[in-house]
Amino acid sequence: MSRAAFRAWVIPLALLAAVLLVSLVVGRYPVGPGDVLRIIAAKLGGEAADVPETAATVVWQVRLPRVAAGLLVGAALAGSGAVFQGLFRNPLVSPDILGVSAGASVGAVTGIFLSLPVVAIQGLAFAGGLGAVAIVAAVGTAARGRDPVLVLVLAGVAIGALLGACVSLVKVLADPYDQLPAITFWLLGSLASTTRGDVLSIVPAIVLGLVPMVLLRWRMNLLTLDDEEARALGVETTRLRLVLIAAATLLTAAAVSISGIVGWIGLLVPHVARSLAGPDFARLLPVALMLGGGYLVAVDTLARCLAATEVPLGILTAAIGAPFFLWLLIAARQAWR
């Protein structure tokens, strides 16, 4: 196996496996690695595990859904970040560039303000994220005769600022003893109350978003060229961008709907994946998915073990991601492509 293949596949897979096992073992109720494997094997085989019932409940009912959610959310954010950075040919682009996170925030805080059930809050967050990008796309379509990429970015910034103001207004109107803490906690991101149903609810959207990315992975490389060069090679750049933007938006909206706002993953992880796998999107995408899922699972494990009170994910991802990103910028020897 070549050194490049080892870096691109073996390292991410090994890190992901180690993180998943550790996340199921550690916690306020520690469970041995052997017991974890026996519990999972017994549950999958429909048999009773030869371990204490409390351990089986903790692993199967509490930790496993949370780990699965962290894996899906982290992979979705990292994959969409890799797509957006390639589409806009900009290393500073993240999945919320078109207002997905802002739209999801408006939907979620509205649901919390109206005291709706959790399922309705998640549904409103998902719809809000998609709706925000639909508005941005409509603005981009109306502003013809200009650079479509620049119009989308500027429209995303403007719509995001407007939706941020809406979130602030709801926070001002919310009950400071009940609703406001819930809104603040959601905006900081958390997987604390994730259930198996939550995980299953976002699987169809994530699969639907990943399919076009995988099928179009070779053409994605051509979008790093100028539009004239890409068209000369037979690529309809406008249509391809729209399809990939829709797919990445679907991934981000699905992830944010159950986790809240978790920053830095879609910005940081694609850079690390690119340093391991190179700029070829066919290799970059799976590596970004593995690293993103493993990273969020690791951060979530740290969040529930770091202190007596669980630390929100948004605080940890920013505290870890910002210094690491600065180090990556200083230490990177290769130009971003």
Image: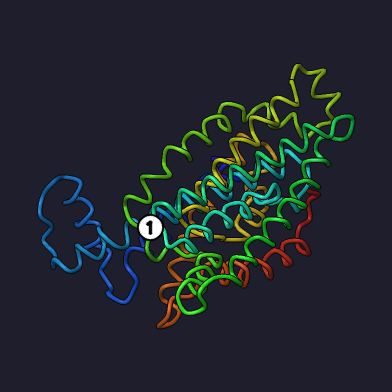
- Residue 201 percent coordinates (x, y): 39, 45
Q: Is residue 248 left or right of residue 189?
A: right
Pick the residue in front: 115 or 250: 115
Q: Is residue 71 left or right of residue 159?
A: left
Q: Quadrant of the C terminus?
A: top right
Relative to residue 175, is residue 215 depicted above or below? above
Q: Nearer the viewer, residue 110 or 86?
A: 110
Circle 1 crowding by C-alpha within 10 Å: few under 14, some 14–19, many from 20: few
Asked whether, in this view, residue 189 is left or right of residue 142, the answer is left
Q: Say how the picture is coloured.
A: rainbow
Name the residue: 64% across, 55% down. Answer: 102
Q: Is residue 135 visible?
A: yes
Please give left or right for residue 29 compared with residue 276 in the image: left
Q: Which residue is mark 1?
A: 117
State whether residue 42 is above or below residue 248: below
Residue 5, horizontal then vertical, whole percent: 57, 41
Q: Where is residue 4 drawn, in percent x and y?
A: 62, 43
Residue depicted at x 34% and y 73%: 27
The amino acid at mark 1 is: Pro
Answer whether residue 337 is visible to the viewer in this image: no
Snapshot quadrant of residue 221: top right
What residue sits 46% from the left and 36% below the top? 207
* Residue at figure coordinates x 85%, y 30% from the top left: 144
Q: How many marks?
A: 1
